[in-house]
Structure formats: structure tokens, C-alpha cells
Image (cartoon, helix red, strand yellow):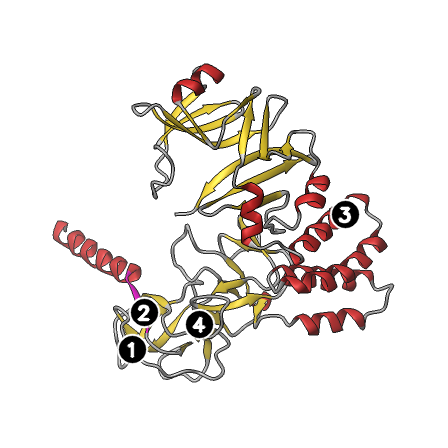
């Protein structure tokens, strides 16, 4: 009897290993309902990952797609790895784009609706992992034929990376001119549809050439005034000011000239650049509230040792007596000196900042109230809270 149970365990483990084995689709093909069937469930794009469910049987293999749909594909279209010799055939009916545009570097489609909720599982009650905007490219390796089914928009089986939405919310990239035309043809009193389309227009404009922001906000602002929501009006007027600044954006040379001599005023002491000694730091702020070792993975900061104060974060090399400012929380004691003629303190309103420096910044409606000013090898990240200047962080790219 023990031998019998041992045999069952071997069989079970073998099945489990097969179920977890990841293989690749080496050409465009479809996920069929059964071997040799003409009916199919969806489309695979060349390069898609699948999980093996059963071995090759009469030229067909049972697999699981990345949205958990199970079906069959011709065994000749499956490979353990991809290389230059894989099939190049394409399915003209397959809607997935194979890296043939400049928007995304792998198999992809685009978000068709405004503020799409991408979920952790193919379930409308599942956790929301990300909010996606109209025109955002999303990775797609398998797409179901049925528009009411779920699709994995991460291109990954990994639970940490996987995200799902309904098939009907993704497709070819929306056309700005078509959306503008659709909006202009609506009756003025059809506020619901005007709001839906104008939201898509604005989000697509942020994903497009910045010149489209002006006509986009022109339509959206019409709807916002109809809704007469004070909060939405103020938010839209601020975003319109940001868009206006981006359209007239300064050159990189002009931006660098604005902030190349930036420093901080901490407790009435100027830092003179972004560095000072560790001894000066402790003399000014005392011992840190917390010390921590942080591996940024790139070695971009002075040291992996960080000092944390209630209103300051600093990278410190104690042996070399050096300190590098990483983040400053702006308050009555701490100010950001953008240049000798521009001292930014906590009385600075977001509106005033945009009006004066809107042409020098980078911004996104995906990260509201956060702006960046580029430097040669880094950038200042400025955050506003409750309409006032809140913090500034020095961010280095790897």
C-alpha cells in the first residue's frame, strides 16, 4: 500500500511540474477548443508565454493562456525558448500589435476608456492594481475572441506583475480627431456622453503630442462648467494652466540655467549646493530620528546609509564626513532656493508656482500635484499638498 501511495505522489508531482512549465508560442496562432477543431477561444501573438497542461498528442498540446483560459494549440507552434529561427507567419485577423509602432516595445494594444481599473485577478471585485488612461499602451500576448472576457494586460504570468481588464476596454489606439468629431456632434444637453468622451480626449492628449492638450481642454472645460462642481472647476483650471505651460515649454538649456545653482535654506543656513558635511548636518539637526541602510540598486546616492529627520532625508558617508540631501520637507524652517531670485517656501501656492514656472516643468495627470525640474544628471521632484508647497526631492536615474 505504501508503494501505491508513493506512485500516486510521483504522478501528482509530475502533473504539477507540467502545469507549471512555461513555454512559448513561436508564431501567431489561435487557442482552439479541441484538437483539430475549427472553433477557437482567442488569439496568441508570436512570443506569447503559455503554461503546459498536457504533452504533445497527435500534433496538439493543451495549454493555459495568461488569462487562465485553457485550450489547444498545434504542437509545432510551441517552443521551450525563442530565438531567431522561430516562425514569422502572421494571422491577419489577430488584433494584437507586434512592436510595429513607437508606443510600446512588445506585443501590445491600447486602453480605450478613461481611468480604466486594472485588477489583480480576472474578477471585478479583485484588488485594483493600477489606474490606466485612454491611449496607454498595455502588453498583450493573448486576447480572447469574446469581448466580455478578461485579458491579462501585463504580458506576464507572475502574480506580482499580472493585471486584468475586460477585452472590450482595449484595442487599437484611439484617434484624437475621431474623438473630437464625436464630441462636437453631441447635443449640448447630453452631459453624460459629453463628459465620457471629453475625459477620453483629455487623457489621450496627455498621451499624445502636447499640442493636442489645448483643443482637448477646450471641450472638457465646456462640460466642467455645465457640471458646475467648484472642486472640479478649480482642478481643471489648474490642469489647463499646467497644459499651457507644457505647450510653451522651455528648452533644456533654459531649464538648467534656472536651477543649476539650486540649494536649500535649512534652519536659516544655506547649504551651498546639495552637499554638506556629516558634522554640519548633526550640528544643525542633531542626531537623526532613524538611521537605515537602503540599497538603491544603482549606487546613485553618496552612500547606502540614510539619516531620517522629521523634515529631512539625507544620504551620509560617516567615514568621509559627507552628507547629500535627498529630500526636504518644506516648512517655516526649510526653504528651497531655486536660484538667488527664487526662494520657494511653504507659503507658495501651487497655482502661483504653475503661473511662474509652468514652462520649466514636466508634469502628468497620473501624478497630480507633483512636478519635476530637469537637471543635467538628475531632477528636482516638487510636491504640493492642499495647494501649498510641501516637499522637494532630488531624484537620480540609474
Residue ranking furthest to the right = 189
- Magenta span: 21-25
| In the displayed structure image, the side of residue 202 where residue 282 appears, left or right | left
- Marks 2 and 3 close (CB-CB < 8 Å): no
Q: Which residue is mark 2?
A: 24
Q: Residue 99: give its label.
A: 4
Pointer 2 or 3: first along the chain: 2
- Marks 4 and 2 close (CB-CB < 8 Å): no
- Marks 1 and 3 close (CB-CB < 8 Å): no
Q: Which residue is mark 3?
A: 232
Question: Which element type, helix, strand or loop, lies under badge 2?
Answer: strand
96 shown above or below 386? below
129 shown above or below 337? below
Image coordinates for residue 347, horizontal then vertical, percent: 70, 29
Compute the Cα span from label 2 to label 3: 47 Å
Which circle, 4 or 2, is nearer the viewer?
4
Q: Which residue is mark 1?
A: 86
Image coordinates for residue 350, horizontal then vertical, percent: 69, 39
Pointer 1 or 3: first along the chain: 1
Compute the Cα span from label 4 to label 1: 16 Å
At label 4, counting other C-alpha atoms closer than 10 Å, the crowd grade (few under 14, some 14-19, many 20 or more) is few
Amino acid at each position: 500500500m505504501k508503494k501505491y501511495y508513493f506512485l500516486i505522489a510521483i504522478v501528482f508531482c509530475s502533473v504539477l511540474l507540467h502545469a507549471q512549465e512555461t513555454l512559448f508560442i513561436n508564431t501567431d496562432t489561435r487557442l482552439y477548443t479541441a484538437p483539430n477543431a475549427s472553433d477557437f477561444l482567442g488569439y496568441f501573438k508570436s512570443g506569447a508565454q503559455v503554461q503546459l497542461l498536457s504533452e504533445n498528442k497527435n500534433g496538439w498540446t493543451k495549454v493555459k493562456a495568461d488569462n487562465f483560459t485553457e485550450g489547444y494549440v498545434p504542437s509545432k507552434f510551441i517552443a521551450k525558448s525563442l530565438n531567431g529561427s522561430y516562425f514569422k507567419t502572421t494571422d491577419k485577423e489577430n488584433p494584437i500589435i507586434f512592436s510595429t509602432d513607437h508606443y510600446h516595445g512588445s506585443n501590445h494594444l491600447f486602453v480605450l476608456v478613461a481611468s480604466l481599473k486594472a485588477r489583480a485577478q480576472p474578477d471585478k471585485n479583485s484588488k485594483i492594481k493600477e489606474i490606466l488612461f485612454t491611449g496607454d499602451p498595455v502588453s498583450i500576448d493573448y486576447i480572447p475572441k469574446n469581448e466580455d472576457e478578461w485579458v491579462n494586460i501585463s504580458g506576464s504570468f507572475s502574480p506580482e506583475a499580472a493585471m486584468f481588464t475586460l477585452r472590450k476596454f482595449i484595442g487599437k489606439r484611439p484617434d484624437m480627431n475621431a474623438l473630437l468629431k464625436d464630441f462636437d456632434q453631441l447635443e449640448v444637453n447630453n452631459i453624460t456622453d459629453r463628459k465620457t468622451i471629453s475625459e477620453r480626449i483629455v487623457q489621450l492628449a496627455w498621451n499624445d503630442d502636447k499640442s493636442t492638450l489645448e483643443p482637448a481642454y477646450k471641450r472638457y472645460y465646456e462640460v466642467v462648467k455645465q457640471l458646475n462642481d467648484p472642486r472640479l472647476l478649480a482642478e481643471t483650471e489648474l490642469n489647463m494652466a499646467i497644459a499651457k505651460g507644457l505647450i510653451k515649454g522651455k528648452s533644456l538649456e533654459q531649464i538648467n540655467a534656472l536651477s543649476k545653482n539650486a540649494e536649500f535654506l535649512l534652519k536659516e543656513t544655506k547649504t551651498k549646493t546639495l552637499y554638506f558635511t556629516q558634522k554640519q548636518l548633526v550640528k544643525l539637526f542633531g542626531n537623526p530620528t532613524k538611521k537605515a541602510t537602503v540599497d538603491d540598486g544603482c549606487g546613485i546616492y553618496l552612500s547606502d546609509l540614510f539619516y531620517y529627520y522629521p523634515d529631512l532625508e539625507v544620504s551620509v558617508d560617516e567615514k568621509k564626513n559627507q552628507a547629500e540631501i535627498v529630500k526636504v520637507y518644506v516648512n517655516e524652517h526649510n526653504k528651497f532656493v531655486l536660484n538667488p531670485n527664487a526662494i520657494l517656501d511653504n507659503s507658495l501656492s501651487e497655482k502661483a508656482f504653475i503661473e511662474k514656472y509652468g514652462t520649466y516643468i514636466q508634469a502628468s495627470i497620473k501624478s497630480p500635484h507633483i512636478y519635476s525640474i530637469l537637471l543635467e544628471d538628475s531632477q528636482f521632484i516638487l510636491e504640493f499638498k492642499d495647494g501649498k508647497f510641501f516637499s522637494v526631492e532630488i531624484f537620480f536615474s540609474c
